[in-house]
Amino acid sequence: MGHASADPACHSSPPTSSALTATAPFVSVIVPVYNDVQGLKRCLAQLAQQTYDPERFEVVVVDNGSDCAEAIEAIVQQYPQAHYTCEATPGSYAARNRGIQVARGEAIAFTDADCVPALDWLTQGIEALVAHPDCGLVAGNIEMVFEGAQQRNAVQLYESITALTQQKFLEQDHYGATANVFTWRRVIDTVGTFDQALKSSGDVEWGQRVYGAGYEQFYAPDARVVHPARASLQQLRRQAIRHAGGFYDLQQKRCGSNLEKNIAFLKLLLFHLMPPVVFAGRALLDAQFISMGQKIKVVLVLCFVRFTIARELFRLRFGGASFRG
């Protein structure tokens, strides 16, 4: 994955006023990492400058079997509020569960090593959580950033209209992407931790479990992180394969009989084999695409993603195992 430089807005000094008092909850920020040394450096540097009371939060970095574990541990040791632990079971949800095990906070915040939190990210997210003490999940805003030339390529344009639409995830599908989620420890104690058998879509399954338990969920647009957009077909292909595994594994987990599993598989497969008519219409009407050629290329990118997912679904249905990405 290409590394994005932080949005300038994330480095500016935000207002220091806060509705939080000296009784603000102690927060554990859980950051899984897998081989992303540079991303972790940026993430921890921003977390070290948060406007939230530095005595009231910790950062738990969970190394998920990185080849560069020593380098990652050395980075973590540079920050007094950060603690290093590791999880050998492959998958970010296994890593997050390990972070939950060692976390000391009554509030839990999740972000990823390749994300750059705004300096008031914790303050804004915890204010939203405290304002709704009986809620199960607060999902913050995830903004995509783009590297390279001012002229975005087709993959970047595709990412700009499809990636990590957090408010839509929450309102339509009842979950938040774990790049930016806040919750209470007591909620996790009630509904359980992530399903670490899932390599992808674990945030979907957990968020919907929270919703099913009767908890409210809220979107906090001012609790911002920025996330690097993918810029190549190779990066998009890896993501599509990982997502296909998550879709498939979650679907199979929720089905009872083999007949139900086969029907659900066929529905999922047919969806990804259908021509992307709705998406094509959106792309053609989107003002950010300068030329018709760009619009066509973006639609072709979606066709590539759907073909990749369909091909992976076939592999999984005939005995393959899902990948971590």
Image (spheres, grey):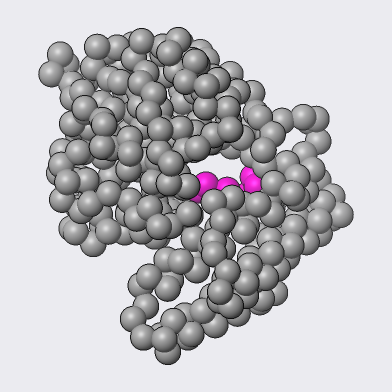
Q: Depth check: 202 or 86 in front?
A: 86
Q: Residue at x 18, y 58 (%)?
A: 214
Q: Residue at x 29, y 12 (%)?
A: 54
- Is residue 161 part of the magenta span, yes or no? yes
- Is residue 122 part of the magenta span, yes or no? no
Q: Is residue 190 left or right of residue 156?
A: left
Question: Where's residue 118, x and y in %?
Answer: 46, 23
Query: Magenta stretch: dominant SS?
Result: helix
Q: Is residue 246 left or right of residue 28?
A: right
In the image, is residue 26 above or below residue 193? above
Question: Where's residue 125, x and y in %?
Answer: 32, 31
Q: Is residue 242 left or right of residue 91?
A: right
Segment colored magenta: 159-166
Q: Residue 293 sits in which quadrant?
A: bottom right
Q: Residue at x 77, y 29 (%)?
A: 148
Q: Residue 30 sits in which quadrant?
A: top left
